[in-house]
Amino acid sequence: MSPQQKRQITDPQALRALAHPLRLTLLELLTVDGPASGRKLADRTGESTASVSYHVGQLAKWGLVEPAPELAEGRERPWRATSRGITWSANGDGSPEFVAASRALREQFIAQRLAALEAYQRHQDDFDPAWQEAAWVGEDIGHLDPDELVEMTERIKAVVGEYTAAARPRSARARRVAFFGYAVPSPDGPN
């Protein structure tokens, strides 16, 4: 698998293992910021090196991270993400175990994205006015069928992918930006 592709998770046990806030954070750091040692990851997360090592080991067990020995400096043992992120099905094989694991991971993912939005709201005044104006929170509602929703989300993901590709050059003013979107049917509409 190319490091630019997202890994499709199909094992419910892997989904359950990933539904842990620190593991999702570690995977995000290694995916977005690149290889890092356990010590650097511990510094970034405020967790102990032992805790980070354990959770990185769990990510490695499922093939989401791997050692990067060619980047080692001294005793530091760096890790890298094996893909550009993860995707998973809502229903997978249809088993109750898969559906529950998928929901648990989605809930953890949503909680982390909402926490990032809340953190921005709390610290908004700390940002340069250009960043405050550039930040976007928006909303729209329309009527789509499932095929149209798939088409729309694929187009959105393609645009986001153009701007988040690891190989894309960064300007001097670039900083980490979190993009979070959702497209779900309203419960009050027709089935």
Image (cartoon, rainbow, N blue to C red):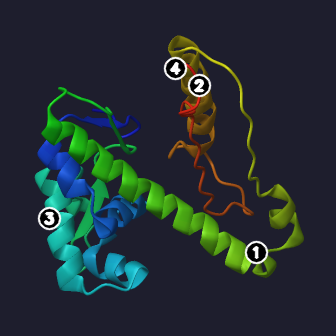
Residue at mark 4: 150
Q: Residue at x 67, y 71 (%)?
A: 120
What's under tag 1, amino acid-wise?
Gln
- Which element carries disc 1, helix, strand or loop? helix
Residue 63 visible in this rendered orientation of the protein: no
Q: Residue at x 50, y 46 (%)?
A: 166
**Closest to the observer: 170 or 133?**
133
Of the image marks 3 and 4, the number of the one nearer the N terminus? 3
Mark 4 is surrounded, within 10 Å at the Cα level, by few (under 14), some (14 to 19) or many (20 or more) other residues, namely few
Q: What label sits on residue 57 in the rendered view?
A: 3
Residue at mark 1: 124
Mark 3 is surrounded, within 10 Å at the Cα level, by few (under 14), some (14 to 19) or many (20 or more) other residues, namely some
- Which element carries disc 2, helix, strand or loop? loop
Q: Is residue 14 above or below residue 60?
A: above
What's under tag 3, amino acid-wise?
Gly
Q: Distance of mark 3 from mark 1, alpha carbons?
A: 35 Å
The total of numbered circles placed on residues is 4
Residue at mark 2: 189
Mark 2 is surrounded, within 10 Å at the Cα level, by few (under 14), some (14 to 19) or many (20 or more) other residues, namely few
Q: Distance of mark 4 from mark 2, alpha carbons?
A: 18 Å
- Which element carries disc 4, helix, strand or loop? helix
Q: Distance of mark 2 from mark 1, alpha carbons?
A: 36 Å
Of the image marks 4 and 1, the number of the one nearer the N terminus? 1
Between label 4 and label 2, give the one nearer the viewer.
2
Residue 169, x across and y down, in percent: 62, 48
